[in-house]
Image (cartoon, grey):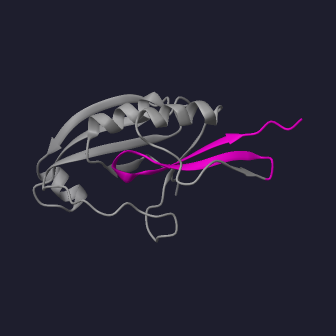
Amino acid sequence: MAIKLENVGIAVRDLEATIAFFTDLGLTVLGRDTVSGEWTDTAVGLDGNHAKIAMLQTPDGQGRLELFEYIHPEAIETTPTRPHEIGMHRVAFSVDDIDAALEIAARHGCHPLRGVATYEDVYKLTYVRGPSGIIVMLAQELKKS
């Protein structure tokens, strides 16, 4: 059996703000829609499912995020995930300039949880708390001299 990762779905509080954050980082919007009806109730397992959605893609075409903002039922606010909690953890992106990526994140009010670390002279990386509490890892591969 062949298997391929299609996308990562993330429920968000504010679809427009979240789209702005990820498109500023370099993702592109592939499409947007509002979905509801029996097929969404069945697929998602939630009666009365009604949401605004957007599909975003990384510039290399390999990674996709499906963002959705619930219209019905009312979205439930939760405490943002912490790095050591069980469950959906983070979404990670390779960037070619971590400082530029952090400047973009800061314009959206998103800052590193602690700072920028260097892993064995291979990567500079950090976790930022993105829109709706999403943990976003940014990693820049360091060039060996």
Residue at 29 percent of width and 48 percent of height? 12
Number of labels in the image equals 0
Residue 98: which quarter of the image?
A: top right
Of 73 and 79, nearer the camera is: 79
Q: Position of residue 32 (x, y in %)?
A: 27, 32
- In magenta stretch: residue 134: yes
Residue at 64 percent of width and 47 percent of height? 116
Q: Position of residue 83 (x, y in %)?
A: 51, 63
Q: Position of residue 49 (x, y in %)?
A: 15, 53
Q: Is residue 41 above or below residue 109?
A: below
Of 144 and 110, nearer the camera is: 110
Q: Is residue 73 above or below residue 142?
A: below
Of 125 and 39, nearer the camera is: 125
Q: Classify the position of the C terminus by image quarter.
A: top right
In this view, the residue farthest toward the bottom is 86
- Side of 33 relative to 113 (left or right): left
- Side of 59 relative to 122 (left or right): left
Residue at 17 percent of width and 61 percent of height? 46
Residue 35: which quarter of the image?
A: top left
Residue range in magenta is: 120-145
- Side of 2 relative to 130 (left or right): right
- In magenta stretch: residue 99: no
Residue at 48 percent of width and 55 percent of height? 90
Q: Position of residue 142 (x, y in %)?
A: 76, 39
- Side of 44 relative to 105 (left or right): left
